[in-house]
Amino acid sequence: MRIRTLYQHTARYSPETLAYVDQIADGKVEIRTIDELVERLIICDEAVAFIPTRDDRQVALELRHPGLVRYLIKVFEFMWGRAVPLDAGAPYETAADGITDIQHSIAKLLVEGHVDEAIARRLGMNVRTCRAHIAKLATALGSGSRAQLGFLIAQSGILNQNG
């Protein structure tokens, strides 16, 4: 049996998650991290999938329709291809432009109109950490206000870069 698991990049800094990973790491488990996950998804034997039905993730919907399961497999494979192996370097390293990968992700979500709380939730971090990244992004771009930050993000071209 092979298990592939995706976590958000922030899991790399969670002692609880890393301890769990150490427990299950037996050569049959591959773990990668990605900046943003769509939602929890479990696929078994390419025949059945489970997705949460509530925000608290305590109840799951079992899907057996072959078309739906194939679609969810494609979604997972897309995310897996964009993810970074857990044992690879840190995904938050600063790029040549002085902006980290996570700050690129935050910039994208900011210009999409998301509020700090939504950005933090989507990226798996607390709001204070998210705001600290926004402040660093603003400093890197020379912004003095949120409106100016949006303008500078668009003007800088960082949304056109990989990140």
Image (cartoon, rainbow, N blue to C red):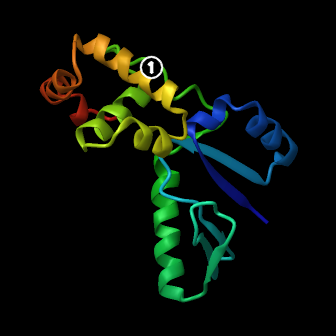
Q: Is residue 94 visible?
A: yes
Left or right of 85 in this view: 105: left
Report the residue marked by disc 1: 132
The answer to which image quadrant residue 2 occupies is bottom right
Q: Please give left or right for residue 153 compared with residue 118 in the image.
A: left
Q: The C terminus appears in which quarter of the rendering?
A: top left
Residue 86, horizontal then vertical, whole percent: 65, 37
- Which residue sits at x=47%, y=85%? 67
Q: Quadrant of residue 100?
A: top left
Packing grade of label 1 (10 A; few <14, some 14-19, many >=20) is few
Which residue does the image show at 24% across and 34% down from the upper left?
159
Q: Is residue 23 above or below residue 2?
A: above
Q: Residue 35, can we see it?
A: no
Measuring from the top left, give residue 92's x and y in whole percent.
49, 25
- Label 1 amino acid? Ala
To which quarter of the image does residue 42 belong?
bottom right
Between residue 39 and residue 116, name the one nearer to us.
116
Where residue 121 sits: x, y (%)? 49, 43
The number of callouts visible is 1
> Which quadrant: the N terminus?
bottom right
* SS at circle 1: helix
Left or right: where 35 falls relative to 42: left
Front-lying residue, 54 or 136: 54
